[in-house]
Amino acid sequence: MTRRALNYRDYLRLDRLLACQAPVSGRGGPAAPDELLFIIVHQAYELWFKQILFELGVVQAEVAAPVVDDRAMGGIVHRLGRIAEIQGLLLRQLDVLATMTPLDFLEFRDRLFPASGAQSLQFRLIETRLGLRAADRVGLAARPPAAGLGAADRRVLRRAEAEPSLCDRVEAWLERTPFVETGGYAFRDSYRQAVRDMLERDAAVMRAGKSGRGVDLAALEAARRHFDALFDEAAHAALVAAGQWRFSARALQAALFINLYRDEPALQLPFRLLSLLMDIDENLTAWRYRHALLVQRMIGLKVGTGGSSGHDYLRQTADRHRVFKDLFALSTFLIPRSRLPALPAKLRRAMGYRYAEGGR
Amino acid sequence: MTRRALNYRDYLRLDRLLACQAPVSGRGGPAAPDELLFIIVHQAYELWFKQILFELGVVQAEVAAPVVDDRAMGGIVHRLGRIAEIQGLLLRQLDVLATMTPLDFLEFRDRLFPASGAQSLQFRLIETRLGLRAADRVGLAARPPAAGLGAADRRVLRRAEAEPSLCDRVEAWLERTPFVETGGYAFRDSYRQAVRDMLERDAAVMRAGKSGRGVDLAALEAARRHFDALFDEAAHAALVAAGQWRFSARALQAALFINLYRDEPALQLPFRLLSLLMDIDENLTAWRYRHALLVQRMIGLKVGTGGSSGHDYLRQTADRHRVFKDLFALSTFLIPRSRLPALPAKLRRAMGYRYAEGGR
Amino acid sequence: MTRRALNYRDYLRLDRLLACQAPVSGRGGPAAPDELLFIIVHQAYELWFKQILFELGVVQAEVAAPVVDDRAMGGIVHRLGRIAEIQGLLLRQLDVLATMTPLDFLEFRDRLFPASGAQSLQFRLIETRLGLRAADRVGLAARPPAAGLGAADRRVLRRAEAEPSLCDRVEAWLERTPFVETGGYAFRDSYRQAVRDMLERDAAVMRAGKSGRGVDLAALEAARRHFDALFDEAAHAALVAAGQWRFSARALQAALFINLYRDEPALQLPFRLLSLLMDIDENLTAWRYRHALLVQRMIGLKVGTGGSSGHDYLRQTADRHRVFKDLFALSTFLIPRSRLPALPAKLRRAMGYRYAEGGR
Amino acid sequence: MTRRALNYRDYLRLDRLLACQAPVSGRGGPAAPDELLFIIVHQAYELWFKQILFELGVVQAEVAAPVVDDRAMGGIVHRLGRIAEIQGLLLRQLDVLATMTPLDFLEFRDRLFPASGAQSLQFRLIETRLGLRAADRVGLAARPPAAGLGAADRRVLRRAEAEPSLCDRVEAWLERTPFVETGGYAFRDSYRQAVRDMLERDAAVMRAGKSGRGVDLAALEAARRHFDALFDEAAHAALVAAGQWRFSARALQAALFINLYRDEPALQLPFRLLSLLMDIDENLTAWRYRHALLVQRMIGLKVGTGGSSGHDYLRQTADRHRVFKDLFALSTFLIPRSRLPALPAKLRRAMGYRYAEGGR
């Protein structure tokens, strides 16, 4: 018995795929020529969401391993890079949607009620699996039933919320970083001293009145307190409770270490991983913001089709649905390479390849 | 005497242009390899700002004419389209700047103090000439001396602020639109009635309880009040005072008319003009927002090199430095084409070409 | 009886849409994690192809009207602009596909045989409906059965080939342009004289030896012959037969007229229409070329899954499947605005709006 | 004595930078409003070329080290990634240039003669330092004096041509890869056998007639010959002489090894390095092609301002000025991961980190 030769149309299920566009306009009313565009844009979004969820799934599984295999790091970084690339495409897709004018949208907008983009399960899943917690959500996003999310979808969402997110996995992975206190080397102490020296030098310059920046002494003092909290369990816990930090102090220290010593072979890909998490956070945020602008352009001051307050709600989520803010805030605590304490030779060696004495 | 043959290098003044990059790092300290990128990104921005200001100048002059020549409309729309295209490039340039990591920025960041992007005269001029008023500016942008803008630059800025902006010119041009009340046709009355009918129909459906959307009756009532204010001098003035509208009622009506009847030959390019003003506003806003994210990534919680509060300040300007919000809000008051009152034949004819009875 | 409330999932047929991804890897063999990406990229392409075909259909119908309604021009230009915008997205999608490495493709490539992108009916239909004729196609594209296109698809394709393409419609529309010989004004004569004068001036400068460009006299002579052929039926027919021109002389003259006098109100949108046809041609060409590079990267020197010779074949189509080359070539025959013969006042008036003596 | 406070304007040399735009139109003739755009686009290109050359310089120096420090690999890959990102911007810049219409270009085009983009020294230097040899250049690019490149520029170019290019450095670095024959493991033999087995299996299926792909037996045989040449000095030399390969057999084998075993920690960044070289080659090629299309649109069939044959010449360079074709061709010789011979445990260990038995 022979397998039937595969062809393009069957392989891609084109007969089904291209039958999934079912405009509501035109049924017992005038056709709205731009509704097809509206449908196809959203379907393309959902296809890409599926791909992002798939990539996230692979990455989550890899990072969840008790010990992340070094051989896996290249693949993890590759997949995160792909997610960022897809996000670039999704941002561009808004430009295509923007070719629909408000007047053309109006031709079929009322027929869509109460369907709404807030009902996209996959979009919520992406947020959740990245690390957005139910309690972080604002406005309509915080109330799935109000947003019109069906019971089955809500169950799927709750299950995803109950599982460790990528953010959780990354935090645990950071906490396991073997280098920060390895080999008798105390990154904490060495680094804290370097920062204190730097701040002291800056303060001395200011006190000498050479910069006319008297006002900055207060900022310097605040920076010092911030630094200290990073190494003080109680102070850190207070900041977590206040929503200022999410990651544990241990994880933040590891992330700092990776940022500062990223040139060591064993830290090069971990550094890219952290950078890509910021890229992904930034891309999602930029998409939300641009989407909010587009919605305002489409519907003005009106409420969205799902009953949300439209533009304002969406703009809020841009700022408040971010997941990896901690990584952005860490930049505050970087110090120039030239002031970095040198790593103990043994530690540096441990972060190199075994073959390294030979080499190319 | 013959003119010396032009060559590429001289034509573009490359010897001077490529000598304008003068890193501060490396002079009495270690070189910071990424400072060149930092300089070139900003210089490329300034080159493009110059181009945008040039295009704005041409457009402002054309729109300022007592009667905007119909032959000029194609050119105006073309130039606005070019500005939007350049903005797309400027947004992309942030991706290039983002390849500089916070640690690499730190190598030379302190040496830049107190220079700051807030001192870009050309960027402020673009905002001002689009229509941002001194009083609209927030934070540091509102205090040019504090922002470090020199006396000469402040004079140039004040002069630009004293002149009619593109926004002013467009408002006046809209007010001159000959169609809105031409030929005995009263767009106001006809349109208001159509909107009232639409709202009445919607309310009837709701009252009949068929939609279960009881809550929306309040929204309907609010929408009706909004519509009415658009045609009531006093109510409109109150909204202007409250910062809800910027354009005059006359100009807003004309903009609505153009949006609604944009298929008439004489309105096709005016419609594109209004759309492009929204594109430009949106692009500038998106750039500001994305820039704010990037700054947060670079410096974390620190203040900017110019002493501004960094990320938060920049994010604020994204929302509050917008100029053409009125055009976005107008979408609230559009009605579907199918409910548009037909234009009087004479008016429609006036908006067509003279040759039109012949034709292609 | 009440209509069930619409929701997002049902509206977009997500249950079906998201069930259309059926990787062949993993069935009786190891799963290839990147096959999902491969499928989704191609499905996204097909969704967008459907949208492009829809927009083309609307435009073709509008341009086919015996007299293209001036009220329709804004819409036609808008839709062509949307197609160009979608093409920008499709180009960007290649960057996403490029995140699949050759080694990852290899995991499932053999299982796809003999399915091939050359079997995309919708892509061929886009080409055909734009104006690519069966005889223009090169390589595998010229032999649909060899390319694996099924009998039903071939019938659909043949039917599309039998109908007037957008290129045909545009040619006929250009031929109907009422201005070129309207009102006793002979664009032909006036313009030809201007060109002859220009060439004569250039030749005089050269003969005077001031430029040292002796070699260019031959080029000048060739340009003159080219110009003349444009106005000589027999010479033009010979060039058509030689594949140098596709449009009739009448249509080419009209396109030139539109390019040269595009500031006249009645020509502003026709000019944009011609520009957009070039954008679309250029975007499709750029996509083909970039796709060819990507295929070479993926499979090296091998043949494609459909048995085509891969990269070389695809690169050939980039150059030879272009449809609107004539419009690009016309740039050869433009003359500076300053040397344009003034249009007769009556003709200029005919190309303005009826209301125009009033104005804004 | 105190250092004067730095400000934005001085830091960026804005007074000079913004005085470098000197249109030729308008001097003793009508101003051409689009000439400023033309100048600024090209100046922005030159700024970015300077940045690319800087990055290339850093990368070339790092790769030139007798032993490339593993700590440097992250930085090398980062800089190549930045070059690719800048290229993405340069591609986008063509869209901005394309907003200049042919008629607007014509207003000042003749005044530019004989200046030409072919005279851009920095563009040629980029090509040369990537690895384009003088003998590889086609058309005008092959004759710098004819292209109008001045004597000083030609000297700079010749000097660059005399130095090892990035391509040369990468080849040498590949040849030094310690893994390919390390530790008694013979990648050659092991891999060749795997390939032979694969081809044999394929041939057996075909002979059994199950696929109906009789014609492919010839292709299989050709592929086998290709494989063999890769491991046969004389056969390889013949292919180099025929211009089919550029890299040595040793370097090609190392590149293959890196592609196939890229998951090993020590190969993850080398794999990204090779991928980025392909990205850069592809981006440059795509830019050249798109530029050729744009030139055709601007000037039609005419010669370029520098006397080049315009579009055709530029299109030729797109295909023939590529530098890293070898890396693309290598895809031909990849085999699926599942058929890869396992590496000896000792070799795998050598390519891991020293710390690896501990881990995260």
Image (cartoon, coloured by chain):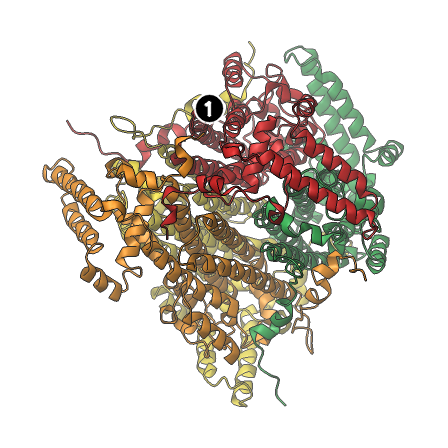
Chain colours: A yellow, B orange, C red, D green
Residue drawn 64% across the image and 64% down it: B34
Residue drawn 61% across the image and 73% down it: D11
Q: Amino acid at mark 1?
A: Leu
Instruction: Give the x, y percent position of residue D164.
Output: 83, 53
Please name whichever residue, C59 or D255, is drawn nearer the observer in this view of the structure: C59
Instruction: Give the x, y percent position of residue D57.
Output: 74, 59
Instruction: Tell me the subunit letter for badge 1.
Output: A
Residue topped by disc 1: A14
Residue D98 higher or lower than A254, as above or below: above
Residue drawn 87% across the image and 35% down it: D241
Dot 1: element: helix
Please name whichever residue, C187 or B198, is drawn nearer the observer in this view of the structure: C187
The residue positioned farthest toward the right in the image shown? D234
Instruction: Give the x, y percent position of residue A59.
Output: 50, 44
In screen coordinates, is C66 left or right of D158?
A: left
* Mark 1 crowd level (few <14, some 14–19, many ≥20, 10 Å Cα): some
Q: Quadrant of residue B25?
A: bottom right
Please name whichever residue, D6 or C11, is drawn nearer the observer in this view of the structure: D6
Residue D11 higher or lower than C287, as above or below: below
Say whether residue D175 is visible.
no
Instruction: Give the x, y percent position of residue B353.
Output: 40, 39
Please name whichever residue, D214 or C317, is drawn nearer the observer in this view of the structure: C317
Where's the N terminus of chain A, which quadrant? top right
Say whether residue A145 is visible.
yes
The residue positioned farthest toward the left in the image shown? B208
